[in-house]
Image (cartoon, rainbow, N blue to C red):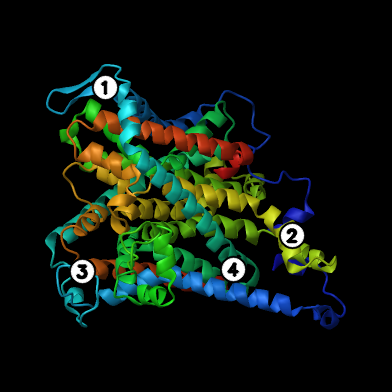
Amino acid sequence: MATQTAVPAPIAPAPLKIRRRSPLAWIGDHVLLAATVVIFIFMLLPNAVILVMSFNQPIGKYDYTWNQFSTEAWAHPCANQALCSSMGLSLEIGLIATVVSTALGTMIAFAMVRHRFKARSGINALLFLPMAAPEVVMGATLTALFFNTIGPGSLGFWTITIAHVMFCLSYVVVTVKSRLAGMDPTLERAAQDLYATPTQTFMKVTLPLVAPGIAAAALLAFALSIDDYIITAFTAGQRTTFPMYIFGSVQRSYPAQINVIGSIMLIGTMAIIAVSTILGRMRATRR
Amino acid sequence: MSSTALLDKSDPPAAGAPPEDRKPRRNFTPWVLLLPGLLWLILFFLVPILTSVSASVQTGNFDDGFKLTWHWANYVDAVKPYWRQYLHSGIFSVATTVLCLALGYPVAYFIAFKGGKWKSLLMALVIVPSFTSFLIRTIAWKTILADNGFVVRILNDLYILKITSKLGITVGTHVLASPGAVVCGMVYNFLPFMILPLYTSLEKIDPRLLEAGNDLYCGTFQTWRRITLPLSMPGVIGGTLLTFIPAIGDYINAQLLGNANTGVVGQSIENLFLRKTDGYPVGSAMSVIMMVGTLVLVMMYIRKAGTEDLI
């Protein structure tokens, strides 16, 4: 869009539009389109299956094959107490881990972008490593530490939360950092030229501009935390989070309620995105 | 944004540097900001790695406790009985990365260059599924690939299963509980991690460059080969990293969609840690091997791309 306005409009646009399009290019374009459609089906099919199977009345213990339409699972999503309490535990851990990791990560991001200090490359490496280490390694090594210090019996809520903050932190830093680095520095300079104190500049210019980045980082951290299985399984001890419950269900029984919760997650997210997009559009037109 | 950036070239391009008018005095602010987060990472990421290096040469069990006995034989125990698992982890993660690149590139290319006004909707479609728990979505493949499902029926009718079973990708007339199903699940799980960085780097390419290529009598393929591909290399490197790293440690897909012969290293580590009373030194040794192996591979990549770029 911006490039189009910058370039002066061509005098005669119509003849320029005529390009030599070989039939080969036409075929290529349509093969690309077909491949994209097929791959999108591949990516979206499981969600469709989850939605359909949530209305299923499974024959045995496993909601894997279609039997009969039923709204039973939607009417009683918490028929299985353990399922819903595991969800509660996951939400609780997710919220704490999101708040802590977003706060610590945003502080690091500000320090990295706005300040000059030594050991920058070392800190970069320390931030990069948790993203480059396989989850199973982080889970196993952290558990080894807990075994060695506080003993295997003390694994539980707090060890899970500590682990979640640890692996969310780097992602928060990356997200906030990219927003900070992409900010137009002239805006803050303009505020200072207009005699704003550093605090005022930060509160009235910097923070509102970085806020979307921080919000995105928090959402990412929450999504990472609530969906994590591997590290959680290592650090959980006797507690069972939602992903752990699902993983265990494969051996016990797989009720349609799990697909109901999966559908609610999908529909809820889509609704939130739709509402925020519409609100954003409305605000944009009002301006 | 872009037009202003083009206009005033006198300004520094990024906010990366602190304002110049600051006096060069000793400043503790960055350390106050850095310290809590860095301490967290040091305590719960770096120290555990050191602990598990020490744990990997201990002996003992849960009842009597573990002692540091410099028992290097743990490393032999961590490799010899498990060579199949290492092999599977390697094959699955490389196959997944290659397939994700092969499937993700056309999608990212299509969205970036042919997406038009649907761009953001299509990118949302790439991300939206990830908001449902990945475990539920992975288990949904059990329904899709079930023996009485349409996928297996079509593959059977086309005699594809005969060929893939000969090649050892599937087992008999089933798709589930086979290496093929494991890789299918892994590709499905990690494809968005490939598409996102690819799309970011493809989207940045000025379409006028491609037009210039066409004007200079480059065919579509030539244009892609000489202009698009080199410019999208950061996305390719980022995407392969983001796919390969989680793929090599993943054992969810092997557990849920595989069989007894598709065991991967992650499963063995989990078994040693959580289901055996004396397995934890050998499990630590395995995770040390895995970490060093992954780090060596990743470092080779970083040398090409640079850390600051990747973060």
Residue B189, given in percent of the width and then of the height, sits at 41, 58
Sequence-wise, which precedes: disc 4 or disc 1? 1
Q: Which residue is mark 3?
A: A257
State the CA–CA distance, disc 4 to disc 1: 53 Å
Q: Residues within 10 Å of mark 1 (few under 14, many from 20)?
A: many
Residue B284, given in percent of the width and then of the height, sits at 31, 31
Residue B21, given in percent of the width and then of the height, sits at 68, 34
Q: Nearer the viewer, residue A153 or B245?
A: B245
Identified at 36% across, 69% down, the residue is: A46
Q: Which residue is mark 4?
A: B111
Residue type, mark 3 in image: Gln
Residue type, mark 2 in image: Ser
State the CA–CA distance, disc 3 to disc 4: 35 Å
Q: Residues within 10 Å of mark 3 (few under 14, many from 20)?
A: many
Q: Nearer the viewer, residue B29 or A152?
A: A152
Q: Which residue is mark 2?
A: B3
| Helix, strand or loop for disc 1 | strand
Residue type, mark 4 in image: Ile
State the CA–CA distance, disc 3 to disc 2: 53 Å
Q: Nearer the viewer, mark 2 or mark 4?
A: 4
Q: For residue B110, say whether it is visible.
A: yes
Q: Nearer the viewer, mark 1 or mark 3?
A: 1
